[in-house]
Image: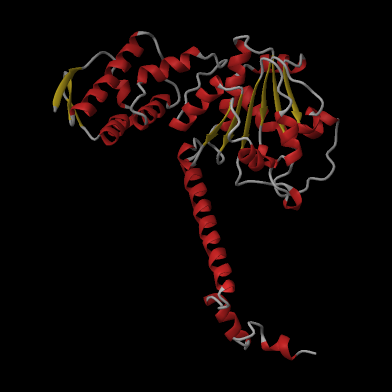
Amino acid sequence: MKKSIEISPNIGTLFGTRDENLRLLEDGLNINIDLRSDSIDLEGAARDVARAEQVFADYDHLQRSGHVFNNGDLGSMLRVLLADHKTTLRGLAEAGRQRSFGRRTVQPKSVNQRRYLEVIESHDMVFGIGPAGTGKTYLAVAMAISALLSKRVNRIILARPAVEAGERLGFLPGTLQDKIDPYLRPLYDALYDLLEPEKVDRYLEKNVIEIAPIAFMRGRTLNDSFVILDEAQNTTSEQMKMFVTRLGFNSKAVITGDVTQIDLPNAKRSGLLEAADVLKHVEGLAFAYFDDTDVVRHHLVQRIIRAYDEHKARAAEGEVSLLDSHANGKPNGTESALLNKNGGDKNSGLPSEVETSE
């Protein structure tokens, strides 16, 4: 099918830098887009051409209504609607406009991010689980600010385990707040990015926004609050149970974490892993999962996460192979090489030095 649509004023901003958005539409919808002096020619399957035409119509409507696209939002929305055929550009833009995120307009940059925002709106407790850079914490803080500014809650409580990432910092100087602030810095960063600094400082001073280690949550009942637990993979089983039972009336809780970056000492099992198993069938709460395709940091981060996942899968396969070889009583290739190198006995599976020592 071939269709020609008229070029409307300012439609050129839809094309993107070096027509990157047009290439995105062509690849995602499997159509050809040909720019003419006074029209745009679309060619492809009837259904795909109709979707592309809807994109152009939605963009024209949003432009006429005064909508402004910021910081690559348009490209992100196009990727979302290409991944979900039920989504429209106008629907995505207007959904973002309905939420008040302070001084920023926050748009989901992937299908999983959009679903994450939707389940936060529709459920009282949500677990956001996925790798670094997928927007789990930032979007949760944005939704908390939206709830506070629209007066659906009276305060925001941000909690995080005080666990170092594989190192010991020793005793930190200053007051208790000075000691815990370094662990909570990512939460401050999100707040200052979404709200004016003066407003953040005022909310913190009046305890409208409270930031604290998870250890301070015990014994509290949190009513009329939006509660976020960040870095939940570093909670113990006891801490996680304590936290999820703090929820009071008219409150929401969002628990975020990356199960591939657990820093708990002494190989304790993560409370987040246990909660994902224990609570998966509990009615009224939801789990939102992210993967490397949802990463919104530098493009290298996606590749790094994928490389670590592949390495972990290969290591797991190697362990299974090693266990199988032991079960069958036969050394694998690596073990055979070590035995031959050390002059070991194939029958015993031990080096001859060990057998002859007294």
Residue drawn at 36 percent across, 27 percent down: 81
Please determine whether, in this image, residue 253 is positioned above or below residue 65: below
Q: Is residue 82 left or right of residue 128?
A: left
Between 272 and 64, the one lying in front of the other is 272
Write down the quadrant of residue 257 in the picture: top right
Residue drawn at 40 percent across, 26 percent down: 77
Q: Position of residue 181 (x, y in %)?
A: 75, 31
Write down the quadrant of residue 144 in the picture: top right
Q: Where is residue 149 in the image (x, y as percent from the top left)?
A: 61, 11
Q: Where is residue 27 in the image (x, y as percent from the top left)?
A: 28, 36
Image mark count: 0
Q: Position of residue 17 (x, y in %)?
A: 34, 30
Q: In this view, does 139 lie to the left or right of 231?
A: left
Q: In which quarter of the image is the N terminus?
A: top left
Q: Tell me how the rendering is colored.
A: secondary structure
Residue drawn at 54 percent across, 20 percent down: 122
Write down the quadrant of residue 234 in the picture: top right
Task: Give the residue furthest to the left.
Answer: 2
Q: Quadrant of the C terminus?
A: bottom right
